[in-house]
Amino acid sequence: MVTKQVKRSKAAVKEALCGYLSISPWVLGFIVLTFIPILSTIYYSFTRWTMMDKPVWIGLENYIHMFTKEPLFYQSVKATALYVLMSLPVILIFGVLLSLLLNMKIKGMNFYRTLFYIPAVISGVSIAMLWTWLLQPDVGIVNSVLSFFGIQGPKWFWDPKWALPSVASMSLWKVGGSAVIYLAGLQNIPPQLYEAARIDGAGKLRIFFKITIPLLTPTLFFQLIIQMIEAFKVFTEAYVITKGGPLKATYFYLLYFYEEGFQHFNTGYASALILVLVVIIMAMTMFVNYTSKRWVYYEGEDKAR
Amino acid sequence: MKKDSMKAVLVLMLMVCLVGSLFAAGAKESAPAKEVVTLEWWTWDSEEYNEASQRAMVKEFEASHPNIKINMTLLPTKGFETKMTTALGAGVGGPDVAFFSVANWYPKALVLDEYIKRDKFDIGMYYKGFWDTKTQFNGKTIGLPLGVGASIVMYNKDLFDAAGVAYPTNDWTTDEYLEIAKKVANPAKKVWGAEILTRPFRAIWFNHGENARLYSPDSTKVDGYLNSPESLAAYEWFYDLMRSGVTPTVSDMATLSTENTGPIDLFMANRLAMATLNQGHMLNAVKAGKNFGVVREPGVGDNPRHVNAWSLLVGIWEGSKHPEEAWTFLKWYVGPEGQKFLMDNANLFPSIDSVAKQYKDADKDYVKGFLEVLNDTQVAIWRGAHPSGTKVEASITDLWDKIKLGLITKDQIKGELNALVPKAQAVLDEAKKTLLY
């Protein structure tokens, strides 16, 4: 009996050891590349540091400066928040619509799916350059088409009122990537539900709102979180096209962070900036997560009970 | 006794000779050859000094300095910055010699004044303006200036001839610049007269007067500089240029001109009659067979003329284990030998006047025009002070945007400048606190 227990415990130890050994590369990588840098960032956010000399501890000064003395902080928060509000609906709604089209059973669908996904693998800088040309006020294709219909197009990226919507409209380009995720969600909806609805005489719109959308809410929830985080991280468009202008209309948070950290070498302050962004994103994610109980439907749940 | 003492002396002399010869032989046999030192040199390649020319230059140096080997590491510009910041910040693994192209690295460069004094290294050979503005930090010499670059106005002679307009000369003024731009522009043929300036507080600003600058020369005060009458006049001149209708639009400039290097593409395509470009563009225009001339940026009255110029600071990392050898390499590489080599084998315009005069096309008008501007006073926003000029400038870009986009009237500029003063002062004060001081 005792021998058996000893053998079992030896086997358990061996198994645990194997387990720890197997995960050790990831754990080590996490500690060195993620955990320590996070701790360091927290520490540096309380210092004045240019990366060249030893950090000088200044307590909360970076945070006090950020919240009380720095108008650029609020400008960048405002531009980023507006961008999130504008781009999220675009990517969510158009993503769903595109996935519905890609879910149709027609010939050559795989070709179309690939076609719409291609933009998702193209680098952000190339896309930004492309959009610069598309929305060029004088010779760009968008304004040329508008002028064909007698409409004088705006100056897009070069008009303080239109710059932010122009950058937000670039989210359309990323729709193909999210459509693939929705497509997977759509294909998980049991076909018998549609069949039953049709037998009961439900129309297409009714089926869409009463079956497709509710059963797609877990995917929508996932996409909302991921795309919201992505939207908060908007950078390339402003860095390449607008440089944060005109009149700071597209001066996004990460551009501000980049300038402070990598152009002005104000690394301590930049660390504080990035931590505040992490807190904002975490708060928003928790809020969305909290509301999800009201609108996300999981098949396994029994709401009637 | 006498015999004995004679014997003793003889024996002693013999011993001395023997021992002496042994030492002499030993010295001859076992004197260690001077140790070969390998220096780490980090660089990048550009049109002015491509990889092949730099590698060939290393061979040339090693041939004349057998005790020094150069390990040349060629990095992409962005990778260079990351690697330098990491190495210099960490204090380990830095290069012996490298470009100190980012102001944040200056405190980590070896101070060279003692070496210069000891070796009587002739700093007078460098263009004075470049030496004064590009090599000093906190009153100390932290590197040597490799090559020179400068903004120059290039004008398209064919477009000027077609419009029947006389070519500009070095003594032209900002008013003449505007007049010429209007005359030479041809909207029917989609030819613009002049480009939109990319930034304020460059040569044309300084040409308006010494107070037409972001802040005081000692980097303490914004009031009286940013909003000075001279600064206001410069902004108003820019306003007139923008409203003249002879420049490309802001969006045209953004899409049709090459990123960060000026509107060379528009100039080469005969769409822009005058453009503020640099010596690299000038050489490309020569290669493309363009019919062009070169003139310095326009002045204002009798005010001293300024040039927006640059040079690459090459320094020794303070943590170098071989500072002596690094100094030997540095003074050769950025001295007459190295710069002449890069001038002859690549496209470098040297920072040494006597070498520049040996340039293969030194007799051509465009080279003469370029070399002439190098003697003008240089624009130096943070000369010897601190590198926060860009940050303060960034704080006032809204006014620049408003003028470019036509969102402001000419009379409002003065009020805008006055309103920007406290904002810019706050940024300056904060920047001084956080950057290097």
Image (cartoon, rainbow, N blue to C red):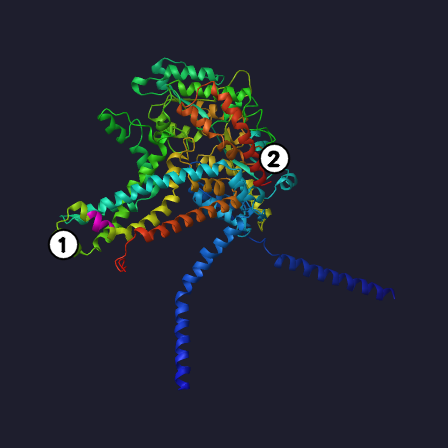
Range shown magenta? A208-213
Reply above or below: B180 against A54.
Answer: above
**Residue at (39, 69) in percent of width and height:** A19
Query: Residue A278 has which mark?
Result: none
Q: Name the foreground residue: A148 vs B150.
A: A148
Residue on which the image places disc 1: A195
> In the displayed structure, does residue A301 sit left or right of residue A286?
left
Farthest residue to the top: give it. B164
x, y percent for residue B101 = 51, 39
User: Is residue A82 part of the magenta span, yes or no?
Assistant: no
Q: Closer to the observer: label 2 or label 1?
A: 1
Q: Name the foreground residue: A185 vs B343.
A: A185
User: Is residue A212 part of the magenta span, yes or no?
Assistant: yes
Query: Residue B122 has which mark?
Result: 2
**Residue at (11, 53) in percent of width and height:** A199
Farthest residue to the front: give it. A305
Callout 1: chain? A
x, y percent for residue A215 = 24, 53
> In the displayed structure, does residue A201 sit left or right of residue B212?
left
Amino acid at dot 1: Glu
Q: Name the foreground residue: B294 vs B358.
A: B294
Badge 2 vs badge 1, beta-carbon distance below 8 Å? no
**Residue at (34, 29) in percent of width and height:** B256
Disc 1 residue crowd, few under 14, some 14–19, many 20+, Cα 10 Å: few
Q: Quadrant of the C terminus of chain A?
A: bottom left
- Mark 2 to mark 1 CA distance (whole Å): 91 Å
Q: What element carries label 2?
A: loop
Disc 2 residue crowd, few under 14, some 14–19, many 20+, Cα 10 Å: few
The answer to which quarter of the image holds residue B293 is top left
Q: What element carries label 1?
A: helix
